């Protein structure tokens, strides 16, 4: 009995899968061509993914088959995802009887017809709506979308991700008329310029308070005046728990810092900001002190070494921080990583994939720090470019490990996958589900290592970066013993 079926266009697999299926409810199915439609037509699905991108659909006309499946599933399907690349009536095949959706995702590579608004209006119980567009749609439906969303009384999650930048009038309409019951909103748009892009907003442009909004991800690609818009928005979200604006420019961060720590946002515990440049070090210190005592999740990018930053963070956030991500061009020395991992005892996720080798100027205090045990025993997800100080992180579920460049890989830090070197230090990771070793310069594995993995990591479901050549038979043996394990 399978709870999920998510199959792509692999002809030799499609012909043999029918024996595994019966006519009971299934959780999800991906439909990409006529063969799949014929195979899965008798089954009732709670989640349907219709993927008609050219790389999968083989340019087949499957809309009549899709309409049959949707008609049959109109009372059972609660989640519908549509990925289309053509512009000839992209959603017209969806029957009006498909009106019990709670989750709708539309991803379009080019223009759509005028049916998105009708689909939203027809589904009175819609809880989540996601719209992804890669080029600028020319349809009138786009202009009517803000009003259709505002009229939805049940919508709680909204995601709009646009690779083009709409005119400011449309953006203003969206921001002013967000559904009042939203708990999560994602608004992102790209750099293609459409119309006049200078914001001319005032407090009068924001007529509503959003009392239920808890999560806001707003990426405006550093539009002039963003800090004013975001500031007005933050003042109207008293329940906000998570705020993300990763594309903010350096100059736009400073005016938002007092708002993030103000009494208007007493529940804010998660912050994801853009790039901190050298001119922002004072703003960083202000942010650390403002969020002290309540910050639980933080992510940002820094364009200068983080020694002082790591020190301030470990002194002020160590009692509350659960998730920390240094992104993009952030540069941090391994001793600074060690400082964070030995002081932040509540840390569950740590992402620092741009670690630098230490510069050779270690003081005695640094050497003493290297010997300290990591206090974050509850760490569940670790993405790190070095692992000189491997510990028994018994709750770890996701581990990414390696070096940024081969020059960073030294004889003193041999991190291959032999039992003597790499695996032997990770025997206690019984909860590990995902191991990513793509960043290791060499991955040595034999039958003894494969047997060790099968015996010692019972929860493992995915290994990425394993290069077993010429010992492919060992991997075949591992797959036979652990049929649910995915290796690539």
Image: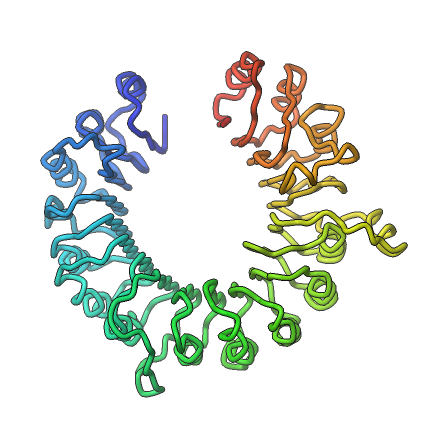
- Residue 127: quadrant of the picture: bottom left
Q: Check the image and tell me how it is coloured.
A: rainbow
**Viewer can see residue 114:** yes
Residue farthest to the front, as pictured? 407
294 left or right of 195 in image:
right
Q: Position of residue 86 (x, y in %)?
A: 17, 44
Q: Position of residue 322 (x, y in %)?
A: 62, 57
**Viewer-closest of 125 and 157:** 157
Q: Position of residue 118 (x, y in %)?
A: 13, 58
- Residue 416: quadrant of the picture: top right
Asked if residue 173 is positioned above or below residue 81 in the image, the reply reads below
Asked if residue 463 is positioned above or below residue 139 in the image, the reply reads above
**Viewer can see residue 297:** no
Q: Position of residue 372 (x, y in %)?
A: 82, 49
Residue farthest to the top, as pictured? 473
142 left or right of 163 in image:
left
The residue shown at (52%, 31%) is 462
Asked if residue 247 is positioned above or below residue 456 in the image, the reply reads below
**Viewer-closest of 130 and 457:** 130
Q: Quadrant of the N terminus?
A: top left
**Viewer-closest of 138 and 83:** 138
The residue shown at (83%, 54%) is 361
Asked if residue 55 is positioned above or below residue 87 in the image, the reply reads above
- Residue 162: quadrant of the picture: bottom left
The residue shown at (27%, 40%) is 49
């Amino acid at each position: 009995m399978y709870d999920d079926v998510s199959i792509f266009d692999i002809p030799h697999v499609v012909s043999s899968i029918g024996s595994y299926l019966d006519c009971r409810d299934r959780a999800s199915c991906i439909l990409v061509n006529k063969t799949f439609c014929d195979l899965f037509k008798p089954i009732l699905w709670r989640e349907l993914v219709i993927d008609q991108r050219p790389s999968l659909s083989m340019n087949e006309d499957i809309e009549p088959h899709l309409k049959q499946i949707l008609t049959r599933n109109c009372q059972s399907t609660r989640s519908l995802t549509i990925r289309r690349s053509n512009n000839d009536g992209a959603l017209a095949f969806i029957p009006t009887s498909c009106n019990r959706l709670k989750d709708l995702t539309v991803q379009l590579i080019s223009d759509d017809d005028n049916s998105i608004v009708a689909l939203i209006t027809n589904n009175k119980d819609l809880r989540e709506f996601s719209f992804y567009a890669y080029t600028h749609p020319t349809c009138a439906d786009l202009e009517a979308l803000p009003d259709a969303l505002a009229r939805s009384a049940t919508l709680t999650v909204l995601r709009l991700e646009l690779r083009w930048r709409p005119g400011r009038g449309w953006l203003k309409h969206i921001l002013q008329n967000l559904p009042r019951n939203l708990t999560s909103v994602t608004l992102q748009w790209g750099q293609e310029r459409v119309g006049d892009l200078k914001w001319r907003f005032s407090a009068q442009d924001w007529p509503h308070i959003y009392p239920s909004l808890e999560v806001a991800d707003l990426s405006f690609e550093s539009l002039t005046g963003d800090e004013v818009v975001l500031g007005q928005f933050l003042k109207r979200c008293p329940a906000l728990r998570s705020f993300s604006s990763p594309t903010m420019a350096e100059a736009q961060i400073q005016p938002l810092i007092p708002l993030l720590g103000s009494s208007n946002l007493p529940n804010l515990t998660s912050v994801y900001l853009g790039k901190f440049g050298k001119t922002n070090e004072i703003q960083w210190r202000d942010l650390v002190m403002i969020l002290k005592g309540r910050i639980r999740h933080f992510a940002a990018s820094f364009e200068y070494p983080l020694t002082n930053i790591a020190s301030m963070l470990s002194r002020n956030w160590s009692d509350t921080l659960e998730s920390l991500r240094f992104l993009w061009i952030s540069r941090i020395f391994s001793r600074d990583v060690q400082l964070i991992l030995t002081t932040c005892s509540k840390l569950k996720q740590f992402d620092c994939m741009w670690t630098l080798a230490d510069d050779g100027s270690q003081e005695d205090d640094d050497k003493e720090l290297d010997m300290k045990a990591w206090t974050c025993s509850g760490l569940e997800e670790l993405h790190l470019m070095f692992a000189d100080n491997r510990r028994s992180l018994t709750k770890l579920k996701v581990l990414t490990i390696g070096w940024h460049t081969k020059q960073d890989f030294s004889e003193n830090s041999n991190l291959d996958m032999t039992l003597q070197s790499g695996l032997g230090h990770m025997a206690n990771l019984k909860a590990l589900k995902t191991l990513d070793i793509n960043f290791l310069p060499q991955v040595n594995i034999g039958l003894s290592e494969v047997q060790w993995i099968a015996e010692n990591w019972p929860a493992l479901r995915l290994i990425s970066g394993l290069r077993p050549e010429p010992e492919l038979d060992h991997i075949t043996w591992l797959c036979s013993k652990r049929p649910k394990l995915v290796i690539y």
